[in-house]
Image (tube, coloured by chain):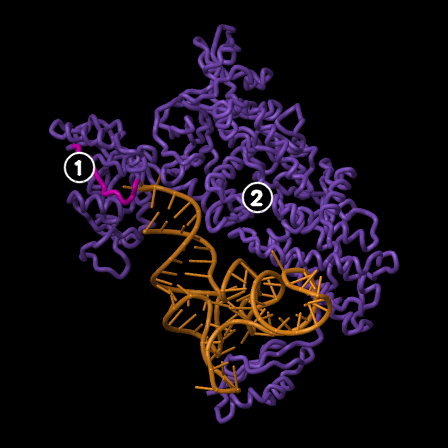
Amino acid sequence: MYPFEEIEKKWREIWEARNVYKTDLESNKDNVYALVMFIYPSGAKLHIGHWYNYGPTDSWARFQKIKGKNVFEPIGYDAFGLPAENYAIKTGIHPYESTNTNIEDIRVQLKEMGCMYDWNSELKTCEPKYYKWNQWLFVQLYKKGLAYRKNAPVNWCPSCQTVLANEQVLADGTCERCGSEVTQKDLTQWFFKITEYAEELLAGLDKIDWPERTKLMQKNWIGKSVGTELEFDIDGSDQKIRVFTTRPDTLFGVTYVVLAPESKLIDSVTTEENRVKVTEYINSVKSLTEIERTSTVKEKTGVPTGGFAVNPVNGEKIPIWVADYVLSTYGTGCVMAVPGHDERDFEFAKRFDLPIRKVILEAGKDADALLEEAYTGTGKMINSESFNGLDSAEGKSKITDRLINENKGERKINFRLRDWLISRQRYWGTPIPVIYCEDCGEVLVPEEHLPVKLPTENIDFKPDGGSPLARNEEFVNTTCPNCNKPAKRDVDTMDTFVDSSWYYLRYLNPKFSEGMFDSKLANNWSPVNQYVGGAEHAVMHLLYSRFVHKFIRDLGLVNSDEPFAKLIHQGTITNQGAKMSKSKGNVVNPNDFISKYGSDVFRMYLMFMGPYDEGGDWNSSGIVGVERFVQRVFTLFSYFKNLAKETNSEEKYELEILSEVEKSVYRKVNQTVLKYETELDNFRFNVAVASLMELINELKNLNECRKDIQLYALERFAVMLAPIGPHLGEEMWEILGNELSIFENPVWFTHDEAALEVDSVTIILQVNGKLRGKIDLPIDTDEQLVKNATWEDEKVKSHTEGKTVVKEIYVKNKIYNIVVR
RNA sequence: GCGAGAGUGGCGGAAUUGGUAGACGCGCUAGACUUAGGAUCUAGUAUCUUAGGAUGUGGGGGUUCGAGUCCCCCCUUUCGUACCA
């Protein structure tokens, strides 16, 4: 039996004692930064999902190490946040205490996994020496005008008792964290101006190797749209209605204009006879929740104001309506309605019997035919006076030009992306380094006073809609850095996504006191070569990090444009189809498997389950397969114990001098080396593991080989085992008679290309594309000989007899197909 | 609604440019060893079959000598998104 307990313990001690995983960060040669998303230490311990994230990624990193790369693989804790605070509310235990207790436990588990983390780089975001630099970042953003405070309608989670960023509200209008329904509230809050970087955040997506899905999500979230902003005069008024449109080519099709219910223009455009109805309508909209209002299944509602706008291109007077399908937060909050060519306007026009005018003709359609639905495609312009006959694209440009000439419009780019709301009315986070003075207004805490420490005494955690820090007099009351008069501190804390948007740079030297991070090291190690984490962060963490990275690049602190060059999302492991969660009580505990099979077997099984980015449903029944494999490996190597002390292997062998058995062993070993390398490099762990299983099946008759061939095979096998089963690999390497840790002294054998060349091939014989036989022939056999052999095949004969041969197809070394009729 | 991905034996899953579908593993069947086997080893294992073959990668069409792979339509499912003008 393979004594995994003893062996795994032994190697972990050796690795730790010899400091095998300390990275030379000063070096700039062959660097590989392998990063997993750091841990959010909520009360729960590491579960299968963590293992699935960290284990295989570590195997990838170890493989880089074994190939001689200078690998940096750190781990740390995203230690601020709600779970610890909620726990404190429930139990009274201070978040600092519970968080640290959790981290202690988690660290033990992490070490059990046998990952090659550089523990010198471990960090916690809840320490002042870390969050000080969040505050510093805030100050820099403020100084560049990229951090600002405004009163705005914000998303409010009544359960978490705090505001949320747009990204933290789910599609169904619930809180990303707790699932409560999010409401709207008007509050004065701090924002980071991520929109300033919208264009670059979008363009940068083309330069990074990320899953297309994720890039698309970011692209949609940023939501760039190119169009024209133009104005409609208001009939009988000096005011104008500005609208944004991506389809100026449909301007002649505008039959009404719509204002969002929040629009400030409503009051002045509404006529007296419509005022009551309009007011009633606006009130009715207010009482709707955001979800109700934005539901696309809801029938469109709206009321006419009685006022009229004037179409800038043809002077036509068209009615002004108020409707809640127009959003105040996008564009100008006003829309020109073209029912003929916009689905929403079409639906609205049908409902309220407004005219529908066709101004774009779909290719091949009749200009006079009635529109059954909005035609949103492009085509020839019609009913558009002098623009008739132009293509949509040309029309867009020409109409815009005319508007520009007449001073009635301009080209405009709009983004769906909003600024990042970072204030949180919670305790367990980074204090916002701002002081409010009656005389001086909002004043930044001077950099030399940072960090503004989060008070740890006399905290009333209980949420009451305000920030817990507001009740801590000692914290709140301070003096103005400008005028020294009594002043008050900002009592909110920062969104924890601020913490996680730059931690990968801090890992390089978490003790660095002269700045946010050590720029010299950051330039050696940025961007991160391989980042691995859950797809749920596709638009939050991963977008914020990109923004912050670009900002600190602009400060001159780092010279790369993107934080993460390559990204992979591990899939989700479910249990009976359901996401594992404490509340459902369906969490699978990894410890049960570790104690029964050892961490290597568990890790290898996770890798073997299926494609890494797909995850899958947990089913422990297959783990015995991996266990058997490990047992067979151990038996095999034990049989050849100390072989490296008895013999030496060559780097390469000429095939001619090998026996048949040796030749097939030699070939298989080299095929496996190549396959293993390509699969592992690309995170296809399941296939990499399978290739080693195939190899051990092939090594059945290894004892019929010469000793040096035996060693040749086994040393390669051991080295390939090491990344995916690190303790096992080390032990097998040692059993062979090697004295040094394979990770301390990395060894990798590249494949022998000559071994992959086969001397004979199996030709597939087909009749009408159907398999009828196979023949083994020397490679590159002459076509005529293949043809002869094919025609001699009994089955081929019986399927072609009495039929006319139409043609014969020969694909060299692959297939001979006879087509008959 | 829209956008992106997925659908292959009893199960998890393999499969270069279109060229032997089902690697590897689980499970199952039979045999060997054994006091015993839920250990280990060996062999087999897509389905139907009149034993010649026929069928087979969600369904239906198509391109091709040849399609899991390419094209069109549809179904199921996962994820994202929710009137962004």
| Vertical side of A377 occupied by A112: above or below | above
Rendering colour (chain A): purple
- Label 1: which residue? A319
Q: Position of residue A330 (x, y in %)?
A: 34, 35
**First reached walking from the N terminus: tag 1 or tag 2:** 1
Instruction: In the displayed orientation, state which residue is furthest to the bottom.
Output: A802
Q: Report the side of A647 relative to A410 (left or right).
A: right
Q: Are marks 1 and 2 on the same chain?
A: yes
Depth check: give the residue in front, A727 or A396: A727
Secondary structure beneath dot 1 equals strand
- Predominant SS of the magenta segment: loop
CA distance separating discs 1 and 2: 65 Å
Q: Is residue A378 visible?
A: yes
- Label 2: which residue? A589
The stretch in magenta equals A295-305
The image shows a total of numbered marks equal to 2
Q: Amino acid at mark 1?
A: Pro
Q: Amino acid at mark 2?
A: Asn
Q: Residue at x 62, y 79 (%)?
A: A763
Q: Position of residue A82 (x, y in %)?
A: 49, 29
Rendering colour (chain B): orange
Residue A541 - label: none
* Residue A380 in magenta stretch: no
Q: Report the side of A601 relative to A443 (left or right).
A: right
Q: Report the side of A322 relative to A603 (left or right).
A: left
Q: Residue at x 74, y 48 (%)?
A: A68
Q: Report the side of A273 relative to A21 (left or right).
A: left
The answer for which chain carries disc 2 is: A
Depth check: give the residue in front, A4 or A96: A4
Q: Residue at x 55, y 30 (%)?
A: A499
Q: Position of residue A305 (x, y in %)?
A: 17, 32
Depth check: give the residue in front, A361 or A658: A658
